[in-house]
Image (cartoon, rainbow, N blue to C red):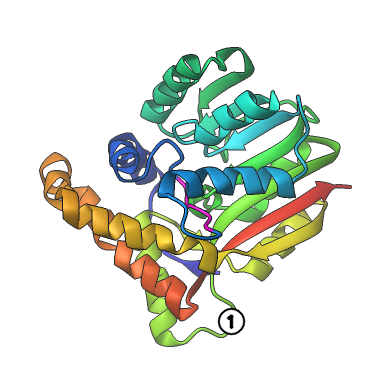
């Protein structure tokens, strides 16, 4: 695991309260990576990641799902609309909570979704109340990942599934230059640490979960940052960000850093499916 001790939780909260609009402009309702098989549009690729993760986790019609780090509600709304799931979304951002609630109403899924503005590491949810614990690109922001996975496991019924997509530190050993790339990504994207693929498997197993599959999707998602980088230049997003909140500029400037980290093996993008024993 590679750590960036200067990251603070209140900064993560502020980042998403301010930067969510940039994510929406640059990428769309699904503010996670796209998953490509060919030359799909970014909108289709982002939806495909949600759909593929749902298939990997074998989510069934009507499953109860907790979506940790639900963002603007893209995945929650998709699962509610297409699989009739009952979804509880959790976000640290009050802006995202309001946006997700509004979007779900527009999508006609408000009866099947609820959104909480809570710290994922502190939120209290009923024991054994969910069929699936879902988290796409949120666990990077957690400060005590092993403790969180232990807590997440308690929310699941026996046989319940965990479905996670996460940015990862590359496999050891990393060179000094690779380690610096990961650190720079953590700093720019407000991640207190990035675990490796093995770290995630160990943490999930220690939480009493059985690993059922692990995928390396790095080459299928890295195009995300080529597109975001190019859109930043095309639309003058960096200048707009510097006016609205100069603190967001480091985030935008690290898009190329994240792409370099993927391309050099300093980082990976992983999908993890585990089952409560």
Q: Nearer the viewer, residue 171 or 220?
A: 220
Total label count? 1
- Could you tell me which residue is drawn at 45 percent across and 35 percent down? 92
Q: Please identify the dominant SS of the magenta region.
A: loop
| Relative image position of residue 110 (x, y in whole percent) | 55, 14
Element under label 1? loop
Does residue 277 show up magenta in the picture? no
Indicate the position of residue 253 as horizontal and vertical percent values. 24, 61
* Residue 33 among magenta residues: yes
Is 129 displayed left or right of 238 in the figure? right
Is 142 placed above or below 169 here? above
**Which residue is identified by label 1?**
172
One can see residue 6 in this view: no
Q: Viewed as shown, does residue 86 lie left or right of 154?
A: left
At label 1, counting other C-alpha atoms closer than 10 Å, the crowd grade (few under 14, some 14-19, many 20 or more) is few
Left/right placement of residue 44 relative to residue 150 reads left
Above or below residue 137? Residue 155 is above
Residue drawn at the location 52% of the way across and 47% of the way down: 138
Relative side of 223 to 110, left or right: left
Q: Residue at x 48, y 52 (%)?
A: 34
Residue 160, how many percent across, how many down? 81, 39
- Quarter of the image holding residue 262? bottom left
Magenta-tinted stretch: 32-36
């Amino acid at each position: 695991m590679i750590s960036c001790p200067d990251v603070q939780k209140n900064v993560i909260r502020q980042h998403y309260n301010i930067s969510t609009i940039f994510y929406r402009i640059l990428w769309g309702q699904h503010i996670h990576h796209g998953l490509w098989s060919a030359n799909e549009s970014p909108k289709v690729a982002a939806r495909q990641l949600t759909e593929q993760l749902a298939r990997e986790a074998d989510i069934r019609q009507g499953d109860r799902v907790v979506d940790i780090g639900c963002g603007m509600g893209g995945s929650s709304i998709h699962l509610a609309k297409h699989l009739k799931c009952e979804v509880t979304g959790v976000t640290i951002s009050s802006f995202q909570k309001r946006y997700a609630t509004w979007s779900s109403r527009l999508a006609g899924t408000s009866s099947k979704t609820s959104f909480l503005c809570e710290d994922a590491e502190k939120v209290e949810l009923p024991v054994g109340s969910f069929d699936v614990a879902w988290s796409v690109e949120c666990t990077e922001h957690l400060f005590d990942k092993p403790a969180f996975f232990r807590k997440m496991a308690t929310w699941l019924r026996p046989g319940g599934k965990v479905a996670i997509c996460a940015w990862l530190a590359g496999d050891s050993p990393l060179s000094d230059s690779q380690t610096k790339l990961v650190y720079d990504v953590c700093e720019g994207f407000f991640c207190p640490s990035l675990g490796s693929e093995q770290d995630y498997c160990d943490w999930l197993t220690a939480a009493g979960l059985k690993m059922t599959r692990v995928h390396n999707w790095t080459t299928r998602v890295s195009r995300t940052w080529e597109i975001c980088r190019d859109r930043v230049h095309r639309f003058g997003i960096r200048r707009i960000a510097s006016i609205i909140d100069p603190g967001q500029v480091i985030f935008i400037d690290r898009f190329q850093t994240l792409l370099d980290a993927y391309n050099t093996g300093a980082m990976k993008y992983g999908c993890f499916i585990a089952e409560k024993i």
